[in-house]
Each structure stands twice: as structure tokens, then as C-alpha cells.
Amino acid sequence: MLSTGLPQGAVPKLERPGPLRDRVYEALLELITTRALQPGQHLVESELAGHLGVSRQPVREALQRLNTEGWVDLRPAQGAFVHEPTEEEADQLLTVRTLLEAEAARLAAAHADSAGIKALEELCAEGEKAVAADDVDSAVALNARFHAKIMELAGNAVLAELAAQVDRRVRWYYTPVARQRGHQSWIEHRGMIAAITARDEQQATQLMREHTEHTRRSYHARSES
């Protein structure tokens, strides 16, 4: 473990080109959403700068932006800390996710072609392998890709834009329950693929609502266990 609590290999390489402050922002946001940086963890500018191989200035600018967006809390005389989401914050976001994704599933059932359905099946197979291997990071990433593909197949650009705004927070909330949801989540994905393939808009909508509700309940239940 590194001194800030980052697992070895967790620090992403800064993508080029682009303004350095933006690349540092993206790197830190990825560390937060994957929970390499845990909620409540103290973020020390000098240490983060050292891990990322940059000066403190772009780190400071990135932390200020993350604070504005609600990912980081800046506390007077204490410094920066990864935000700890409240149960209410999580509930509100996951409820909005249900509304967006249920509509996406309905539209996907109406518009998906054979190539799109094949892509869903391939993502599902990869997700099942990740769960079987207990590869939580890959399972979370594949879960996000599966839902993004359904959103793409829906063919509604405005809906996709709204979903993109909440996608990273969904990943943030999903990560701690990914192992608990495990194989059952991908069984539910298989059911959605079947409904989309059958062009059953009502069934696809209902299955997606139930699926996202299961995730919401699992997130709240984790703090009670």
C-alpha cells in the first residue's frame, strides 16, 4: 500500500494530450469511483502529486473541481477528503437511474438490431466470467458497459446524455455491492437480453426496474450487515 492508501498499481497513467489539470482530474475521479480512494479518505496534495508525477498545482485545481462536483469535501484547517455519500444521496441518484434505464430498456426493445443484441450477449458472457473469477473491478466495469450498451441501443441522445451524468456515481455506489450482487445481477441481465430480443417493451421495462431496484436495496442493506 502507498502512504495515501492507494493499492499498488492503482494509480492510472495520465492520458495525453490535454490540459494537465484535466488529466489529473480524470485520474483522481477514476481512483474515487473505483474506490481505490475510499469515502472519507484524507487526500494529501503532495502525496497525490508524487503518485501522479506532477506538481501540486494541478492536483489542487483538480481537488477544487472535484469539490464543486461533490466528489471531495474541502474542510478548513483539515484539507481534502473523499466525500462520504449519505444514504439519502445514494437513494435519490439510484432512483433517477431507475427512471432513465427503464426507459432505455423499453426503447432498446423497440429498436435493437441483431448486432446490438449480440454485443449485449458478449458483454454478459464476459461479466459472468468476471464474477466466476471473483474479479470485482472487471465485473463493475462490464456492468457499466452493459448498461451503456442498452442506452446506446435505445437511440435517444438526450436520454444518453442524462444517463452519462449519473453513470460515474452509479459505478461508485455499485462497487461496494458488486460482489454481493454477483451472479444474480448477470442472471437479470440475461432476462433483459431475452426481453429485448423478443421486442417485448413492457417486459424489458419491468425487468430493468426490478434490476435497478435490487441494486438500490443492496446498497442500503450493506450498511446494515
Image: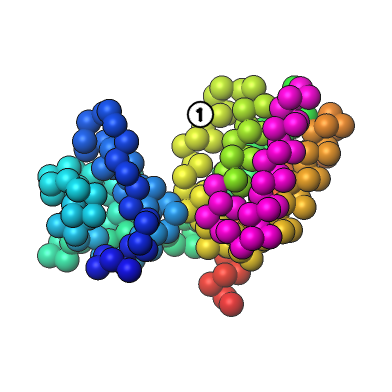
Residue 14: quarter of image: top left
Q: Nearer the viewer, residue 15 or 98?
A: 15
Mark 1 belongs to which amino acid? Glu
**Residue drawn where x is 39% and y is 59% of the image:** 36
Residue at 74% of width from left, 38% of height from top?
121
Quadrant of the snapshot with the C terminus: bottom right
Magenta stretch bounds: 112-141
User: Under tag 1, what secondary structure?
Assistant: helix
- Hey, which quadrant is residue 27 in on the image? top left
Q: Residue 139 in the image: x percent, y percent? A: 60, 53
Query: The N terminus appears in which quarter of the rendering?
Result: bottom left
Residue 60 location (% of width, % of height): 17, 48
Which residue sits at x=67%, y=27%? Answer: 153
Q: Residue placed at 27% from the left, 49% from the top? A: 67
Q: Main secondary structure of the magenta part?
A: helix
From the image, tell me which residue sits under label 1: 161
**Residue 80 visible in the displayed image:** no
Query: Tag count in the figure?
Result: 1
Q: Is residue 205 above or below residue 32?
A: above
